[in-house]
Image: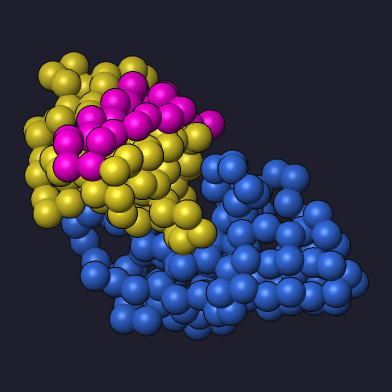
Amino acid sequence: DAKTTQPPSMDCAEGRAANLPCNHSTISGNEYVYWYRQIHSQGPQYIIHGLKNNETNEMASLIITEDRKSSTLILPHATLRDTAVYYCIVRVLNSGNTPLVFGKGTRLSVIA
Amino acid sequence: GAVVSQHPSWVICKSGTSVKIECRSLDFQATTMFWYRQFPKQSLMLMATSNEGSKATYEQGVEKDKFLINHASLTLSTLTVTSAHPEDSSFYICSARDALAGGTGELFFGEGSRLTVL
């Protein structure tokens, strides 16, 4: 079972920041927060991951609350190509033999 | 980044025939690959874990005799849907992790293979 809770859908205006929340209140101390997205009819794409510190890369920023029970993925300037389903997943680092368990994710629609 | 390739990207077959889907890690070795199935407007569901040189591990409710998995090398896993029926029509996705990489434990996904059974 997925250990995260996300809103089923969100809209965002093109060029604005998209803030996608995720609750993971039962996260364990050795579990990281991973974000993937799936554009229609494609395989999932890795976005970012973090443990407790905020993280940023060329795609997005990840803000994790101090108690680690929730996080927010931020797409700073959303474009139409960012329309996708975004999945928040908690997982132990380097658990290569452990699959990703996907919840229902958040369907983000970026609107022109 | 690491690339996982699936082939074919889409296939249409008649009911009762078998279809093979290939999953290749193009620039890394993968001792373990995972196969998922995704029905329209639903999330990815794990079907099985493919282990190089040994038998696959299937999730509850997935018939191992219907979905044959072979992981004969460190860069290739195949999923064969035997005696396909229309209800097997779905989007099949594989994923893999670089067995020699440390760090993130990031799993890479193939582009997916859409199967339509008539």
Residue sticking out furthest to the front: A112
Q: Is residue B64 visible?
A: no
Quarter of the figure with residue A54: top left
Q: Residue at x 43, y 37 (%)?
A: A107
Q: Quadrant of the C terminus of chain A?
A: top left
Q: Which residues are magenta?
A: A1-24
Give how far across and how far down residue A50 sits, in percent: 19, 39
User: Relative to B101, is A63 above or below?
Assistant: above
Quarter of the figure with residue A9: top left
Q: Residue at x 13, y 19 (%)?
A: A66
Quarter of the figure with residue B87: bottom right
User: Relative to B88, is A89 above or below?
Assistant: above
Closer to the camera in the image, A80 or B91: A80
Q: How is the image coloured?
A: by chain
Horizontal arrangement in the rendering, residue A40 relative to residue A25 (left or right): right
Give how far across and how far down residue B15 sits, in percent: 88, 69
> Chain A is shown in which shade?
yellow
Give how far across and how far down residue A80 sits, in percent: 30, 50
Give how far across and how far down residue B9 sits, in percent: 56, 74
The answer to whether residue B98 is magenta is no
Q: Residue at x 33, y 22 (%)?
A: A23
- Which chain did the image draw in blue? B
Q: Is residue A110 visible?
A: yes
